[in-house]
Amino acid sequence: MIEPDMHSGLAPIRDRFLLLLSERQDSIQQNLELAIQSDDLADQYLAHIEATLHKIAGSAGTLGFSELGDRAKATETNIISQRTNGATQYRDIYFDIIAFLECSIEATCPAV
Amino acid sequence: MLILAVDDDPIILELLQHYVDSLAGHELVTAESVADALEIFKHEKRRFDCFLVDIQMPDIDGIEFCRALRETNVYQRTPILMLTAMSEKSYIDGAFSAGATDYITKPFEINSLKGRLSLVEQISADAQTKTVDRRTAGTTGNSTRQDEQNIELHQPLPIYDVDGVIENHAMENYVTQLSRKSLCGSVVLGFTVRHATDLFFNLSSYDFSCVITDVAEAIADCLLPTQRLVSYAGNGTFVCVVEGATTIDVDRLVDQMNIYIRTMELSTSDGAALEVRICAGQPNRLVWRKGGAAVEALREAHISAEQAANQRDKDMNRFWLNEQLV
């Protein structure tokens, strides 16, 4: 998933991005569990996930993780769309978020 | 340029720092929130030449910060480039309405950032030399100050403190950057102050710029509640991008604007009443136009409004001539 033609000067920033990505994955996972457990506050937890995805989408592409960035943006857009449409069932979004987490784990720990 | 970047994502700030360091002649100061930026203003003695501001931030967002900067005397014209991962029109409209000069979509590349910075460098230089504080002039009533600004008739004057009114170069950036899909359904419309040349030569520069500002306010207010952006393109002509106005009753709109202007009771600095009226050109729908073609639509709206004003004068002259013959 990492694109080979990265500017070498960006390597340290990319390393920090990956460290931060790991924390962001944890945050998404934690908020996802909370959202699934409490329907009443699901919207609030999804807002946190949306903000985290927004940050990943903003910098992933520049650092050579275009696919991850696109995936984050698509998931974020899906959450926004469902939340603004007043959806009461977020089941599809939850699956979408899980798919994103799998994709991002692959980015941080690519299969050998 | 001394640049202040405000973004709540530390990775974006690091990327900006890395890119700006690689460009000669620029220095970057970073803040992770608007609150941090305000702290920096307290300690930084130098004036910033450019801002890079993330739109979506917790607490105070980038649009609010942009609006606040435009309300200061120092940063009325300083280039503000908004950073956004969201390319939806509502975000972009909000940013330009608040006074943004342009925007950069995340993820961005160094060439894109370099290009934008070089484009705003000239605007920044102009902002340093030509910042005009109309509000100060108005409150002090200092008549010598009022004519210090030498303006040209064709010059797209900056207009401050009017909701929905943006600078002409920002309007060009706005239509250039938005996607075809986003602009589809928007209408470009031009309005011209009739006898603008006479007004320009008979009034002081200050009084002329006040007339232009008041007319801008009338146009922007009368176009509400539609989402609209208005800019002054020079020569007494305004161009507007109005969203979703599939059918505009232009005659009725112009009447409404002229009534609005009349109620403003415009006058010169020494109290002489001014009779200012406007007329409109043909509305032009932005169907599937992009980049240069969208900017061309602004030019066409400009020309159309001026032609309408000339035609109106010819019709009036013909009318009076016929009256005299009768």
Image (cartoon, coloured by chain):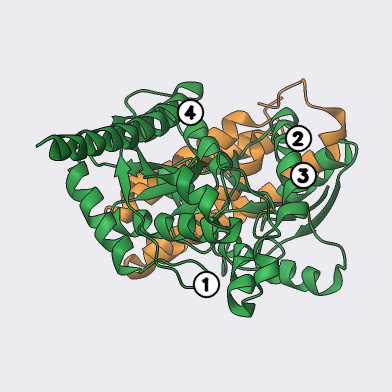
Chain colours: A orange, B green
Residue holding disc 4: B295
Residue A32 in view (yes/no): no
- The amino acid marked with disc number 2 is Ser
* Nearer to me, B101 or B150: B150
Residue holding disc 1: B270
Q: Do circles 4 and 2 both sit on a common chain?
A: yes
Question: x, y (%) of residue B149?
Answer: 68, 56
Q: Residue at the spot x=33%, y=48% of the render?
A: B278
Residue holding disc 3: B16
Distance, label 2 to label 1, CA atoms, is 43 Å
> Under tag 4, what secondary structure?
helix
Distance, label 4 to label 3, CA atoms, is 29 Å
Q: Do circles 4 and 3 both sit on a common chain?
A: yes
Distance, label 2 to label 3, CA atoms, is 15 Å
The quadrant in which the N terminus of chain A is found is top right
Chain letter, disc 3 residue: B
